[in-house]
Amino acid sequence: MLTADEPDPRPAGPDDVAAGPPGGTGAPRHADDGQSELDGVVRTIGRRARRTNLTRAAQLCTALSRAEAGELDPIARQQATELAHQLVGSAGTFGFGAASELAGQLEDFFGAGVFDEPGLQAARRQLEALGDQLQGEPSD
Amino acid sequence: MTTLDPQPADRADPARPARPTRHVLVVDDDELLREVARAALELVGGWRVTTVLSGAEAQRQAQALRPDAILLDVMMPGLDGPGTVSGLRQDDRTRDIPIVFLTAKLPAGDHPAWNHLDLAGVISKPFDPMTLAADMAHLLGWGSEPRDADG
């Protein structure tokens, strides 16, 4: 059974913040201030996302190995498809556009469930390229 | 009833009444995407943001908070995006809340299967955090939001 990501340890519920943007309700802020601050926030979150996405890529590698051995059951295949789907959104949002596209191809591969030799070889190349991309720096 | 937070008077005309802050409910099972969407909508949009990680919780919070809009992931475990919308549309308290899908499943402009959901729009994943607020404002018809450069 493919191991899924660790579930969110926090109870499901509103993750509310203080009303209004950071800085309270003082003088209006310039749009650039918001953009600059957002850029910093995205970089910080992006570092965490990179670790998460590398873990997802490793789990996809495990799934692919099982597919190559003819041992990937339907539940594990669905989990692999979902992992790839998560990578599409997360990798791309945090600046790894090429990795996002590769993840999309892997999502299609696992989703189709056709594990012939050409497909497996192509998926292996895509997964290796995906890992290389995620190990590098965001480029988008 | 949505609580409105008055914003400071416009810098260009201090006599103008403060504009209430929009309140957006963000729904995504990916914690980090929730965080970046929250930051984008707060810091650039100037909006108030509540985040939840499931469709079921989204329905509960939408009933309680009556947000001005919902940004909703499509593929989530349990109740997915379309299922969440269907539930919201059946409740008088939430039926009219505009909803924007956020999804990697289909390109933004190609979603005939969702026509019956009466969505305000679709934003594709991956999304650009820098333009998320502007993209949402455009889909929702929220005028000149996000904040102008003059504040």
Image: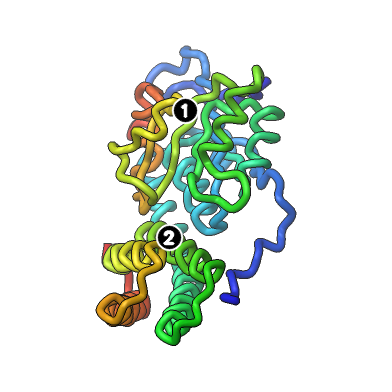
Amino acid at pointer 1: Leu
- Which residue is depicted at the point 36% across and 29% down? B139
Residue A15 percent location from the top left of the image: 66, 47
Q: Is residue B16 above or below residue B85?
A: above
Residue B92 percent location from the top left of the image: 65, 17
Residue A73 located left or right of residue B142: right
- Dot 2 falls on a residue whose secondary structure is helix
The quadrant in which residue A92 appears is: bottom left
Q: How many marks?
A: 2
Residue B104 located left or right of residue B117: left
Residue B53's disc is: none
Q: Is residue A82 above or below residue B139?
A: below
Asked whether the residues under marks 1 and 2 belong to the same chain, the reply is no
Chain letter behind tag 1: B
In the picture, the quarter occupied by the N terminus of chain B is top right
- Which residue is depicted at the point 71% across and 46% down? A13
* Residue that badge 1 annotates: B117
- Which residue is depicted at the point 47% across and 28% down? B117
Q: Nearer the viewer, residue B45 or A125?
A: A125
In the picture, the quarter occupied by the C terminus of chain B is top left
The quadrant in which residue B93 appears is: top right
| Label 1 with label 2: CB-CB less than 8 Å | no
Examine the rendering and report whether any part of residue A127 can be seen: yes
* Residue that badge 2 annotates: A85
The image's colouring method is: rainbow
- Which residue is depicted at the point 54% across and 26% down? B68
Q: Nearer the viewer, residue B98 or A116?
A: A116
- Dot 1 falls on a residue whose secondary structure is helix
Amino acid at pointer 2: His
Chain letter behind tag 2: A
Residue B150 percent location from the top left of the image: 34, 31
